[in-house]
Image (cartoon, rainbow, N blue to C red):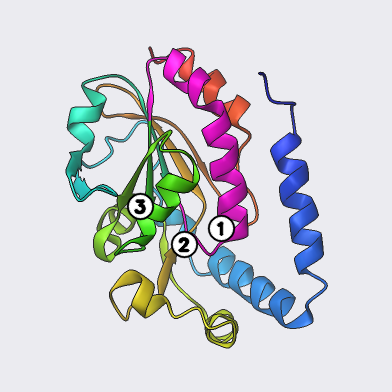
Amino acid sequence: MEDDIGQLTEKLTELRRSRRLNAGWDAAYLQMIHTLEHDGFHAGIMRPGEVFPDFMLPNAAGQLVSLEERCGQGPVVLGFFRGTWCPFCKLMLEALAEAMPRIQAKGASLLALTPETGALPAALQARHDNRFEVLCDVDFGVGLQAGVVYKIPPLYRANLNTAKLDLSIRHGNAAWCLPVPAIFLIRPDGFIARSFVDVDFTKWPEPSEIISTLEGLC
């Protein structure tokens, strides 16, 4: 069934408003956005027309998946997600799971990358009925090459600690980094056709925008 235009955006906006009732969360959120907007972060993000670097990452079952192999089968929708704990990522992944029949109808596959390790990628994939593949971006290797990974500002890190979200355990390293919301649409030849990247982790593209771009990539 076709998704209503703007449906995901409405859900994200509603969630963002509810979270802003918490003054501490709001201050940390605003500090993070301000930091990324003013420290030159945008300059390092990969752009359409560039070749996305090939990679080989473990999936939820521990098997290695390469981008080159997937591109050999058709266009790839490659997304970076913060993890199982992020409610905004959950909404985007739910929307993508619902859109998978239309994504696959365009000959494309979806790879969802997360810095989380251990059993967490498998839990994320199972939550969405294994409709797409979840890969562990070990030590942010792919995200750093794509330019979408940042060091978490102090105030936001303090809030995560207060919420007992120890990312050093979830990520298997002490870097305390995260990816920004990012979707790259990659052609079969490896070139980036379009990207949706925003430093605001409460914003994601509508699945209809992604599917519309895939029209010309088959």
Question: Residue 141 appears at what percent x and percent y?
Answer: 25, 59
Looking at the image, is 166 positioned above or below residue 102?
Answer: below
Q: Which residue is mark 2?
A: 41
Disc 2: CA contacts within 10 A as few (<14), some (14-19) or many (>=20): some
In the image: residue 100, left or right of residue 125: right
Q: Is residue 26 magenta?
A: no
Relative to 141, say whether 56 is above or below.
above
Query: What amino acid does circle 3 point to?
Result: Ala
Numbered circle sitting on residue 98 = none
Residue 146 x, y percent position in the rendering: 34, 50
At 70% from the left edge and 39% from the top edge, which residue is drawn? 8
Q: Say which mark, if any, is on residue 122.
A: 3
Indicate which disc, 3 or 1, sits on the residue closer to the N terminus.
3
Q: Earlier in the sequence, mark 3 or mark 2?
A: 2
Q: Contact (CB < 8 A) between labels 2 and 1?
A: yes
Is 91 part of what is drawn in magenta? Answer: yes
Left or right side of 208 for 128: left
Which residue does the numbered mark 1 point to in the structure image? 199
Query: Percent position (x, y) of residue 9?
Result: 72, 42
Which element is circle 2 on?
Answer: helix
Q: Nearer the viewer, mark 2 or mark 1?
A: 1
Q: In the figure, is residue 207 to the left or right of 190?
A: right
Highlighted magenta segment, given as a residue range: 81-109
In the rendered image, which quarter contains the C terminus?
top left
Magenta region, main secondary structure: helix
Q: CA distance from mark 2 to mark 1?
A: 9 Å
CA–CA distance between discs 3 and 2?
A: 31 Å
Task: For the N terminus, give its image quadrant.
Answer: top right
The type of residue carrying mark 2 is: Phe
